[in-house]
Image (cartoon, helix red, strand yellow):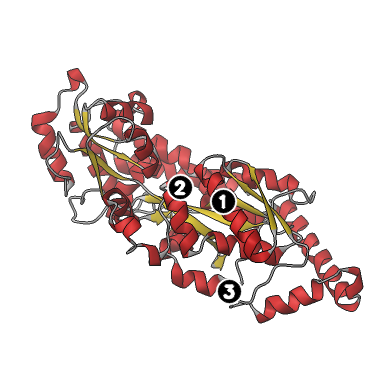
Amino acid sequence: MSRRLMMTAVIAVLFSFSFLAACDKAENSPGKEEQSNEAQQQRNSSEGLQPEPGAELLVWESKGPEFDFLKAISVEFEKKYGVKVKVEAVPAIDSVKKLTTDGPAGIGADVFSAPHDQLGNAVTAGLILENDVFDEKMTNEFMSSAISGVKYQGVLYGFPTAIDTYALFYNKKLMDKAPQTYEDIINFAVTYNDPANKKFAFMWDVAQLYQSYSFLAGYGGYVFGNEGTDANDIGLNNVKAIEGAKFLQSLKQILPINVNDMNDNIITGFFQEGKTAAIINGPWLISSLSKDNLDYGVAPLPLLPNGEHPKSFSGIRALYVNSYTKYPAAAKLFASFATNKENLKLRFEMTTQLPPRNDLTNDPILTENPNALAFLEQAKYSTPMPSIPEMGNVWQPASAAIASIWNDNQDPAAALNKAVEQIKTAMKTKH
Protein backbone atom coordinates (compact mmCIF):
# COMPACT_ATOMS: atom_id res chain seq x y z
CA MET A 1 0.00 0.00 0.00
CA SER A 2 2.82 2.43 0.92
CA ARG A 3 4.54 1.76 -2.39
CA ARG A 4 1.34 2.51 -4.26
CA LEU A 5 0.87 5.77 -2.36
CA MET A 6 4.50 6.70 -3.10
CA MET A 7 3.91 6.09 -6.81
CA THR A 8 0.79 8.23 -6.68
CA ALA A 9 2.74 11.02 -5.01
CA VAL A 10 5.50 10.84 -7.62
CA ILE A 11 2.95 11.01 -10.41
CA ALA A 12 1.34 14.01 -8.72
CA VAL A 13 4.69 15.83 -8.51
CA LEU A 14 5.51 15.08 -12.14
CA PHE A 15 2.09 16.27 -13.14
CA SER A 16 2.64 19.53 -11.25
CA PHE A 17 5.91 20.19 -13.12
CA SER A 18 4.36 19.36 -16.48
CA PHE A 19 1.41 21.63 -15.73
CA LEU A 20 3.72 24.58 -14.89
CA ALA A 21 5.70 23.97 -18.05
CA ALA A 22 2.51 23.94 -20.04
CA CYS A 23 1.54 27.32 -18.62
CA ASP A 24 4.84 28.80 -19.88
CA LYS A 25 4.74 27.04 -23.22
CA ALA A 26 1.15 26.62 -24.23
CA GLU A 27 2.13 25.57 -27.71
CA ASN A 28 3.56 22.34 -26.31
CA SER A 29 0.18 21.35 -24.90
CA PRO A 30 -2.66 22.85 -26.97
CA GLY A 31 -5.68 23.92 -24.97
CA LYS A 32 -4.31 22.92 -21.53
CA GLU A 33 -4.10 26.46 -20.18
CA GLU A 34 -7.50 27.37 -21.49
CA GLN A 35 -8.92 24.15 -20.06
CA SER A 36 -7.45 24.92 -16.61
CA ASN A 37 -8.78 28.48 -16.56
CA GLU A 38 -12.19 27.36 -17.67
CA ALA A 39 -12.30 24.61 -15.06
CA GLN A 40 -11.62 27.19 -12.36
CA GLN A 41 -14.25 29.57 -13.70
CA GLN A 42 -16.86 26.86 -14.07
CA ARG A 43 -16.10 24.84 -10.94
CA ASN A 44 -19.63 25.25 -9.61
CA SER A 45 -21.44 25.67 -12.91
CA SER A 46 -22.92 22.81 -14.90
CA GLU A 47 -23.81 25.06 -17.81
CA GLY A 48 -20.43 26.49 -18.79
CA LEU A 49 -18.25 23.39 -18.97
CA GLN A 50 -17.25 22.65 -22.56
CA PRO A 51 -15.42 19.64 -24.02
CA GLU A 52 -11.84 19.98 -25.17
CA PRO A 53 -11.37 20.53 -28.94
CA GLY A 54 -11.07 17.17 -30.69
CA ALA A 55 -12.18 15.19 -27.65
CA GLU A 56 -13.22 11.55 -28.10
CA LEU A 57 -14.31 9.32 -25.25
CA LEU A 58 -14.11 5.64 -24.39
CA VAL A 59 -16.67 4.44 -21.84
CA TRP A 60 -16.77 1.09 -20.00
CA GLU A 61 -20.01 -0.48 -18.83
CA SER A 62 -21.28 -3.97 -18.10
CA LYS A 63 -22.94 -5.80 -20.94
CA GLY A 64 -26.72 -5.68 -20.67
CA PRO A 65 -29.44 -3.02 -20.58
CA GLU A 66 -27.16 -0.52 -18.84
CA PHE A 67 -24.70 -0.91 -21.72
CA ASP A 68 -27.53 -0.36 -24.21
CA PHE A 69 -28.55 2.77 -22.32
CA LEU A 70 -25.09 4.33 -22.55
CA LYS A 71 -24.90 3.54 -26.26
CA ALA A 72 -28.25 5.24 -26.79
CA ILE A 73 -27.35 8.44 -24.97
CA SER A 74 -23.90 8.52 -26.57
CA VAL A 75 -25.60 9.31 -29.85
CA GLU A 76 -27.43 12.22 -28.23
CA PHE A 77 -24.27 13.42 -26.51
CA GLU A 78 -22.42 13.55 -29.81
CA LYS A 79 -25.26 15.51 -31.39
CA LYS A 80 -25.22 18.04 -28.58
CA TYR A 81 -21.49 18.41 -27.96
CA GLY A 82 -19.81 17.05 -31.09
CA VAL A 83 -17.86 14.47 -29.08
CA LYS A 84 -17.72 10.89 -30.32
CA VAL A 85 -18.23 8.24 -27.65
CA LYS A 86 -17.34 4.57 -27.90
CA VAL A 87 -18.96 2.29 -25.33
CA GLU A 88 -17.06 -0.91 -24.60
CA ALA A 89 -18.40 -3.88 -22.62
CA VAL A 90 -16.33 -4.27 -19.45
CA PRO A 91 -17.98 -5.70 -16.30
CA ALA A 92 -18.38 -2.95 -13.72
CA ILE A 93 -16.94 -5.19 -11.00
CA ASP A 94 -13.73 -5.56 -13.06
CA SER A 95 -13.27 -1.96 -14.21
CA VAL A 96 -11.11 -0.72 -11.31
CA LYS A 97 -8.78 -3.70 -11.54
CA LYS A 98 -8.50 -3.30 -15.32
CA LEU A 99 -7.88 0.43 -15.00
CA THR A 100 -4.95 -0.21 -12.66
CA THR A 101 -2.91 -1.29 -15.67
CA ASP A 102 -4.81 0.31 -18.56
CA GLY A 103 -4.97 3.77 -16.97
CA PRO A 104 -1.23 4.46 -16.74
CA ALA A 105 -0.78 2.84 -20.17
CA GLY A 106 -3.13 5.39 -21.68
CA ILE A 107 -5.62 2.82 -22.99
CA GLY A 108 -8.19 2.92 -20.19
CA ALA A 109 -11.71 4.28 -20.46
CA ASP A 110 -12.22 8.00 -19.96
CA VAL A 111 -15.45 7.22 -18.10
CA PHE A 112 -16.19 3.90 -16.43
CA SER A 113 -18.89 2.25 -14.36
CA ALA A 114 -18.06 0.68 -11.01
CA PRO A 115 -19.86 -0.35 -7.81
CA HIS A 116 -19.32 2.21 -5.05
CA ASP A 117 -17.68 -0.25 -2.66
CA GLN A 118 -14.59 -0.23 -4.91
CA LEU A 119 -14.22 3.52 -4.60
CA GLY A 120 -11.70 3.46 -1.75
CA ASN A 121 -9.31 1.20 -3.63
CA ALA A 122 -9.66 3.30 -6.79
CA VAL A 123 -8.97 6.58 -4.99
CA THR A 124 -6.03 5.11 -3.09
CA ALA A 125 -4.54 3.97 -6.41
CA GLY A 126 -5.01 7.43 -7.91
CA LEU A 127 -7.38 6.24 -10.64
CA ILE A 128 -10.29 8.68 -10.30
CA LEU A 129 -10.76 12.41 -10.70
CA GLU A 130 -12.89 14.34 -8.25
CA ASN A 131 -16.38 15.35 -9.31
CA ASP A 132 -15.38 18.94 -8.60
CA VAL A 133 -17.41 20.75 -11.24
CA PHE A 134 -20.80 19.26 -10.50
CA ASP A 135 -20.43 18.60 -6.76
CA GLU A 136 -22.84 21.22 -5.42
CA LYS A 137 -25.39 20.59 -8.17
CA MET A 138 -25.43 16.82 -7.67
CA THR A 139 -25.53 17.05 -3.88
CA ASN A 140 -28.76 19.00 -4.19
CA GLU A 141 -30.32 16.77 -6.83
CA PHE A 142 -29.51 13.25 -5.59
CA MET A 143 -30.53 11.17 -2.58
CA SER A 144 -28.19 11.74 0.32
CA SER A 145 -27.45 8.00 0.58
CA ALA A 146 -26.39 7.95 -3.09
CA ILE A 147 -24.11 10.95 -2.65
CA SER A 148 -22.65 9.45 0.52
CA GLY A 149 -21.90 6.24 -1.35
CA VAL A 150 -19.82 7.95 -4.04
CA LYS A 151 -17.81 10.10 -1.64
CA TYR A 152 -14.50 9.07 -0.14
CA GLN A 153 -13.08 10.88 2.88
CA GLY A 154 -15.59 13.65 2.32
CA VAL A 155 -14.72 14.21 -1.34
CA LEU A 156 -17.25 13.59 -4.11
CA TYR A 157 -16.00 11.38 -6.94
CA GLY A 158 -18.92 9.57 -8.55
CA PHE A 159 -21.93 10.34 -10.72
CA PRO A 160 -24.69 8.03 -9.35
CA THR A 161 -26.71 6.07 -11.89
CA ALA A 162 -28.75 3.76 -9.63
CA ILE A 163 -29.30 2.72 -6.04
CA ASP A 164 -29.75 -0.95 -5.17
CA THR A 165 -31.10 -2.32 -1.94
CA TYR A 166 -33.31 -5.22 -0.96
CA ALA A 167 -36.88 -5.47 0.25
CA LEU A 168 -39.58 -8.05 0.97
CA PHE A 169 -41.17 -10.03 -1.87
CA TYR A 170 -44.42 -11.72 -0.84
CA ASN A 171 -46.82 -14.12 -2.55
CA LYS A 172 -50.23 -12.42 -2.72
CA LYS A 173 -52.05 -15.76 -2.95
CA LEU A 174 -50.52 -16.85 0.34
CA MET A 175 -50.53 -13.53 2.17
CA ASP A 176 -53.54 -11.22 1.97
CA LYS A 177 -51.30 -8.21 2.46
CA ALA A 178 -47.68 -7.38 3.04
CA PRO A 179 -46.58 -8.10 6.61
CA GLN A 180 -45.98 -4.85 8.47
CA THR A 181 -43.86 -6.37 11.24
CA TYR A 182 -41.73 -9.44 11.81
CA GLU A 183 -44.28 -10.42 14.42
CA ASP A 184 -46.81 -10.69 11.56
CA ILE A 185 -44.49 -13.13 9.79
CA ILE A 186 -43.92 -15.20 12.94
CA ASN A 187 -47.66 -15.46 13.55
CA PHE A 188 -48.28 -16.42 9.92
CA ALA A 189 -45.64 -19.15 10.15
CA VAL A 190 -47.51 -20.88 12.98
CA THR A 191 -50.28 -22.00 10.60
CA TYR A 192 -48.31 -22.06 7.32
CA ASN A 193 -44.96 -23.72 7.96
CA ASP A 194 -44.53 -27.34 6.88
CA PRO A 195 -40.77 -28.09 6.85
CA ALA A 196 -41.28 -31.70 5.71
CA ASN A 197 -42.79 -30.36 2.48
CA LYS A 198 -40.36 -27.42 2.29
CA LYS A 199 -43.03 -24.84 3.02
CA PHE A 200 -41.82 -21.82 4.95
CA ALA A 201 -43.35 -18.47 5.76
CA PHE A 202 -40.11 -16.56 5.29
CA MET A 203 -36.60 -17.11 3.95
CA TRP A 204 -33.48 -15.06 3.37
CA ASP A 205 -29.83 -15.85 2.80
CA VAL A 206 -29.02 -15.93 6.51
CA ALA A 207 -25.24 -16.33 6.36
CA GLN A 208 -24.86 -13.53 3.83
CA LEU A 209 -23.87 -10.40 5.75
CA TYR A 210 -25.31 -8.27 2.94
CA GLN A 211 -28.87 -9.29 3.87
CA SER A 212 -28.50 -10.11 7.56
CA TYR A 213 -26.90 -6.73 8.23
CA SER A 214 -30.43 -5.26 8.24
CA PHE A 215 -31.13 -6.97 11.57
CA LEU A 216 -27.94 -5.80 13.26
CA ALA A 217 -28.17 -2.26 11.91
CA GLY A 218 -31.88 -1.99 12.69
CA TYR A 219 -31.01 -2.29 16.36
CA GLY A 220 -28.09 0.14 16.12
CA GLY A 221 -25.13 -1.91 14.96
CA TYR A 222 -22.82 -0.76 12.16
CA VAL A 223 -19.70 -1.86 10.34
CA PHE A 224 -17.50 1.24 10.59
CA GLY A 225 -18.16 4.52 12.35
CA ASN A 226 -18.44 8.00 10.85
CA GLU A 227 -20.72 6.84 8.04
CA GLY A 228 -18.53 3.87 7.18
CA THR A 229 -15.25 5.78 6.94
CA ASP A 230 -13.60 5.13 10.32
CA ALA A 231 -12.03 1.66 10.31
CA ASN A 232 -10.88 2.16 13.90
CA ASP A 233 -14.50 2.21 15.06
CA ILE A 234 -16.11 -1.19 14.42
CA GLY A 235 -19.71 -1.51 15.55
CA LEU A 236 -20.52 -5.09 14.59
CA ASN A 237 -20.21 -6.27 18.18
CA ASN A 238 -21.62 -3.34 20.12
CA VAL A 239 -24.49 -3.94 22.54
CA LYS A 240 -27.11 -2.96 19.97
CA ALA A 241 -25.67 -5.17 17.22
CA ILE A 242 -25.70 -8.12 19.63
CA GLU A 243 -29.35 -7.42 20.38
CA GLY A 244 -30.12 -7.49 16.67
CA ALA A 245 -28.21 -10.76 16.29
CA LYS A 246 -30.26 -12.28 19.10
CA PHE A 247 -33.48 -11.47 17.28
CA LEU A 248 -32.03 -12.88 14.06
CA GLN A 249 -31.17 -16.07 15.92
CA SER A 250 -34.73 -16.34 17.26
CA LEU A 251 -36.09 -16.57 13.71
CA LYS A 252 -34.68 -20.07 13.37
CA GLN A 253 -37.91 -21.22 15.01
CA ILE A 254 -39.73 -20.40 11.75
CA LEU A 255 -36.84 -21.31 9.44
CA PRO A 256 -35.27 -24.50 10.84
CA ILE A 257 -32.68 -24.96 8.09
CA ASN A 258 -28.89 -25.05 8.24
CA VAL A 259 -27.33 -22.11 6.39
CA ASN A 260 -25.37 -24.55 4.23
CA ASP A 261 -28.68 -25.71 2.80
CA MET A 262 -29.78 -22.19 1.86
CA ASN A 263 -28.56 -19.98 -0.93
CA ASP A 264 -30.09 -17.43 -3.24
CA ASN A 265 -30.99 -20.00 -5.93
CA ILE A 266 -32.75 -22.31 -3.46
CA ILE A 267 -34.62 -19.47 -1.78
CA THR A 268 -35.72 -17.95 -5.07
CA GLY A 269 -36.76 -21.37 -6.35
CA PHE A 270 -38.99 -22.02 -3.35
CA PHE A 271 -40.63 -18.63 -3.83
CA GLN A 272 -41.19 -19.19 -7.54
CA GLU A 273 -42.73 -22.60 -6.81
CA GLY A 274 -45.18 -21.05 -4.38
CA LYS A 275 -43.74 -22.83 -1.33
CA THR A 276 -42.21 -19.86 0.48
CA ALA A 277 -44.56 -16.98 1.22
CA ALA A 278 -42.03 -14.18 1.59
CA ILE A 279 -38.32 -13.67 0.86
CA ILE A 280 -35.72 -10.91 0.97
CA ASN A 281 -34.25 -10.01 -2.39
CA GLY A 282 -33.38 -7.11 -4.67
CA PRO A 283 -34.97 -5.44 -7.70
CA TRP A 284 -32.89 -7.62 -10.02
CA LEU A 285 -35.27 -10.50 -9.18
CA ILE A 286 -38.23 -8.76 -10.82
CA SER A 287 -37.22 -9.65 -14.38
CA SER A 288 -37.07 -13.35 -13.46
CA LEU A 289 -40.42 -13.32 -11.68
CA SER A 290 -42.11 -11.61 -14.62
CA LYS A 291 -41.66 -14.84 -16.57
CA ASP A 292 -43.37 -16.97 -13.91
CA ASN A 293 -46.84 -15.39 -13.88
CA LEU A 294 -46.47 -15.22 -10.10
CA ASP A 295 -48.87 -12.91 -8.28
CA TYR A 296 -46.45 -11.16 -5.97
CA GLY A 297 -45.88 -7.80 -4.34
CA VAL A 298 -42.90 -5.92 -2.96
CA ALA A 299 -42.87 -4.08 0.36
CA PRO A 300 -40.28 -2.43 2.60
CA LEU A 301 -38.74 -4.78 5.16
CA PRO A 302 -41.09 -5.36 8.12
CA LEU A 303 -40.60 -3.43 11.35
CA LEU A 304 -38.39 -5.05 13.98
CA PRO A 305 -39.62 -5.85 17.51
CA ASN A 306 -38.00 -2.61 18.70
CA GLY A 307 -40.32 -0.69 16.37
CA GLU A 308 -37.49 0.38 14.07
CA HIS A 309 -37.06 -0.13 10.34
CA PRO A 310 -34.38 -2.65 9.38
CA LYS A 311 -31.44 -0.78 7.84
CA SER A 312 -30.55 -2.60 4.67
CA PHE A 313 -27.23 -2.33 2.90
CA SER A 314 -27.38 -0.38 -0.33
CA GLY A 315 -25.11 -0.35 -3.32
CA ILE A 316 -24.63 2.71 -5.50
CA ARG A 317 -23.95 2.21 -9.19
CA ALA A 318 -22.07 5.16 -10.60
CA LEU A 319 -19.89 6.53 -13.36
CA TYR A 320 -16.38 7.79 -12.62
CA VAL A 321 -13.81 9.77 -14.59
CA ASN A 322 -10.40 8.19 -15.14
CA SER A 323 -7.60 10.36 -13.74
CA TYR A 324 -5.48 9.50 -16.78
CA THR A 325 -8.01 10.79 -19.32
CA LYS A 326 -6.79 13.28 -21.91
CA TYR A 327 -10.21 14.91 -21.92
CA PRO A 328 -11.32 15.53 -18.33
CA ALA A 329 -13.84 18.23 -19.22
CA ALA A 330 -15.54 16.11 -21.88
CA ALA A 331 -15.49 13.07 -19.59
CA LYS A 332 -17.09 14.94 -16.68
CA LEU A 333 -19.62 16.47 -19.03
CA PHE A 334 -20.59 13.02 -20.34
CA ALA A 335 -20.94 11.56 -16.84
CA SER A 336 -23.15 14.48 -15.85
CA PHE A 337 -25.19 14.19 -19.05
CA ALA A 338 -25.74 10.47 -18.42
CA THR A 339 -27.12 11.18 -14.96
CA ASN A 340 -29.42 14.12 -15.67
CA LYS A 341 -33.13 13.77 -14.97
CA GLU A 342 -34.20 12.94 -18.52
CA ASN A 343 -31.51 10.33 -19.04
CA LEU A 344 -31.87 8.58 -15.68
CA LYS A 345 -35.58 8.35 -16.38
CA LEU A 346 -34.71 6.64 -19.66
CA ARG A 347 -32.22 4.43 -17.84
CA PHE A 348 -34.94 3.25 -15.45
CA GLU A 349 -37.19 2.41 -18.39
CA MET A 350 -34.40 0.37 -19.97
CA THR A 351 -32.89 -1.29 -16.87
CA THR A 352 -35.55 -1.08 -14.08
CA GLN A 353 -32.67 -0.02 -11.78
CA LEU A 354 -33.83 2.67 -9.34
CA PRO A 355 -32.74 6.22 -10.20
CA PRO A 356 -31.37 8.01 -7.11
CA ARG A 357 -32.49 11.49 -8.19
CA ASN A 358 -34.79 13.41 -5.86
CA ASP A 359 -36.67 14.94 -8.78
CA LEU A 360 -37.74 11.51 -10.06
CA THR A 361 -39.28 10.20 -6.84
CA ASN A 362 -42.58 11.92 -7.68
CA ASP A 363 -42.46 11.17 -11.39
CA PRO A 364 -45.32 8.97 -12.69
CA ILE A 365 -42.77 6.48 -13.99
CA LEU A 366 -42.12 5.62 -10.32
CA THR A 367 -45.33 6.62 -8.55
CA GLU A 368 -47.32 4.35 -10.84
CA ASN A 369 -44.95 1.43 -10.18
CA PRO A 370 -45.71 0.04 -6.67
CA ASN A 371 -42.75 -2.32 -6.69
CA ALA A 372 -40.32 0.49 -7.49
CA LEU A 373 -41.90 2.63 -4.79
CA ALA A 374 -41.39 -0.15 -2.23
CA PHE A 375 -37.67 -0.34 -2.99
CA LEU A 376 -37.35 3.44 -2.89
CA GLU A 377 -39.10 3.46 0.48
CA GLN A 378 -36.67 0.86 1.82
CA ALA A 379 -33.79 2.83 0.30
CA LYS A 380 -34.65 5.67 2.69
CA TYR A 381 -33.58 3.39 5.54
CA SER A 382 -30.57 1.95 3.77
CA THR A 383 -26.88 2.41 4.49
CA PRO A 384 -24.32 2.41 1.65
CA MET A 385 -21.82 -0.39 2.08
CA PRO A 386 -18.52 1.10 3.32
CA SER A 387 -16.23 1.86 0.39
CA ILE A 388 -12.96 2.03 2.30
CA PRO A 389 -10.45 -0.72 1.45
CA GLU A 390 -10.75 -2.21 4.96
CA MET A 391 -14.26 -3.43 4.10
CA GLY A 392 -12.66 -6.34 2.27
CA ASN A 393 -11.64 -7.76 5.65
CA VAL A 394 -15.20 -7.78 6.99
CA TRP A 395 -17.28 -10.08 4.81
CA GLN A 396 -15.83 -13.49 5.65
CA PRO A 397 -15.50 -13.18 9.45
CA ALA A 398 -18.92 -11.53 9.81
CA SER A 399 -20.64 -14.13 7.66
CA ALA A 400 -18.92 -16.94 9.59
CA ALA A 401 -20.14 -15.41 12.86
CA ILE A 402 -23.73 -15.27 11.64
CA ALA A 403 -23.50 -18.87 10.44
CA SER A 404 -22.29 -20.05 13.85
CA ILE A 405 -25.03 -18.07 15.61
CA TRP A 406 -27.60 -19.77 13.40
CA ASN A 407 -26.25 -23.29 12.91
CA ASP A 408 -24.61 -23.87 16.29
CA ASN A 409 -26.76 -21.62 18.47
CA GLN A 410 -23.58 -19.87 19.55
CA ASP A 411 -23.88 -16.90 21.86
CA PRO A 412 -24.18 -13.83 19.59
CA ALA A 413 -21.84 -11.75 21.72
CA ALA A 414 -19.10 -14.38 21.59
CA ALA A 415 -19.50 -14.93 17.85
CA LEU A 416 -19.46 -11.24 16.96
CA ASN A 417 -16.56 -10.49 19.31
CA LYS A 418 -14.53 -13.20 17.59
CA ALA A 419 -15.42 -11.79 14.17
CA VAL A 420 -14.33 -8.29 15.12
CA GLU A 421 -11.02 -9.58 16.48
CA GLN A 422 -10.43 -11.40 13.19
CA ILE A 423 -11.25 -8.21 11.26
CA LYS A 424 -8.82 -6.17 13.34
CA THR A 425 -6.09 -8.76 12.91
CA ALA A 426 -6.61 -8.84 9.15
CA MET A 427 -6.41 -5.05 8.92
CA LYS A 428 -3.18 -4.95 10.93
CA THR A 429 -1.65 -7.69 8.80
CA LYS A 430 -2.41 -5.87 5.56
CA HIS A 431 -0.90 -2.64 6.86
The residue pinned by badge 1 equals 72
Badge 2: how crowded within 10 Å, few (<14), some, or many (20+)? some
The residue pinned by badge 2 equals 350
Closer to the chain start, of discs 3 and 2, is 3
The residue pinned by badge 3 equals 46
Q: Residue at x 13, y 33 (%)?
A: 189
**Label 1 with label 2: CB-CB less than 8 Å:** yes
Q: Nearer the viewer, mark 3 or mark 1?
A: 1
**Label 3 with label 2: CB-CB less than 8 Å:** no
Per the model, the C-alpha gap separating discs 3 and 2 is: 26 Å
Can you give x and y, in whole percent of width and height, for residue 347 in the image? 47, 52
Q: Quadrant of residue 251?
A: top left
Most distant residue in the left direction: 191
Amino acid type, mark 2: Met
Which of the pair 397/98 is nearer the observer? 98
Residue 430 can be seen in this image? yes
